[in-house]
Image (tube, rainbow, N blue to C red):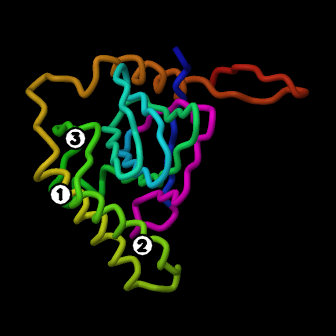
Amino acid sequence: MPTFTYEIHDMNVPLLPFRFRPLMDVTGRRSLPNWHEETEILYSFKGVGNVRLGGENVSFQKGDTVVVNTRIPHLVESETSVQYCCLIVKNSFLTENGIDPATLRFEAKIHENRVQDAMEAVRNTFSAYTPESFDGILQIRSAVLNLFSLLCKYHASPLEKGEKTDETEEKPKSAKRYHERYYLRYDGGKRSRTMD
């Protein structure tokens, strides 16, 4: 089993609590296994791949949207090639807009025209964005909120009281505690663990 790295996503523009990667390409390999607090959306526009979500394998091809729920270890792999975009959304943006990702489980894989159209709108608003455009910020926020509105309405279910988001949730929490307690530094080109 791969080692999953805890990712910290610093969003540099306070009004845009998102990270958007317009082109991710996994060809004959796998992405860095990782997990994080934020909700992540992958949208494929070319090729075929596989997304590992905790203990679940999800096939992934053109037109598919895969939702990585909060704190779920994940990676993308392809024996051939898969191209997709990646949207990472701060949970604070969702909760400020009445969506609590800690109490919802989004479906892992969605292949539906409404969601495809919403993802294309997100891609288009990000590609048209310029830092000096306040209107562009509003359009991006609106497109992301529209996407999550659709996901909540048609592709989410509430978690039962006490239900975990994934059976592997304790491993990520343990890794995060380790990450917070220790750090890596380089001594003469050699990596070593040191305590705070």
> Would you identify the image quadrant in which residue 106 lies?
top left
- Element type where label 3 sits in the image: strand
Residue sitting at x 20%, y 36%: 105
Is residue 24 in the magenta section? Answer: yes
Query: Can you say whether 9 is above or below 191 in the image?
Result: below
Give the residue pinned by disc 3: 106
Instruction: State left or right for residue 37 relative to residue 128.
Output: left
Q: Residue at x 38, y 29 (%)?
A: 53
Q: Earlier in the sequence, mark 2 or mark 1?
A: 2
Residue 193 lies, with reference to residue 128, above or below; the image says above
Amino acid carrying mark 2 in the image:
Asn
Q: Amino acid at mark 1?
A: Leu
Looking at the rendered structure, the kind of residue marked 3 is Phe
Q: Which residue is mark 2?
A: 124
Q: Secondary structure at mark 2?
A: helix
The relative height of residue 162 versus residue 103 in the rendered view (above or below) is above
Q: Residues in magenta?
A: 12-36
- Nearer the N terminus, badge 3 or badge 2? 3
Per the image, the residue denoted by label 1 is 150
Q: Pick out the residue farthest to the top.
A: 1
User: Relative to the observer, which residue lies in front, 192 or 134?
Assistant: 134
As drawn, which residue projects farthest toward the right?
A: 188
181 relative position to 53: left or right: right
Could you tell me which quadrant the C terminus lies in? top right
Answer whether labels 2 and 1 touch (C-beta < 8 Å).
no
The secondary structure type at the circle numbered 1 is helix
Q: Earlier in the sequence, mark 1 or mark 3?
A: 3
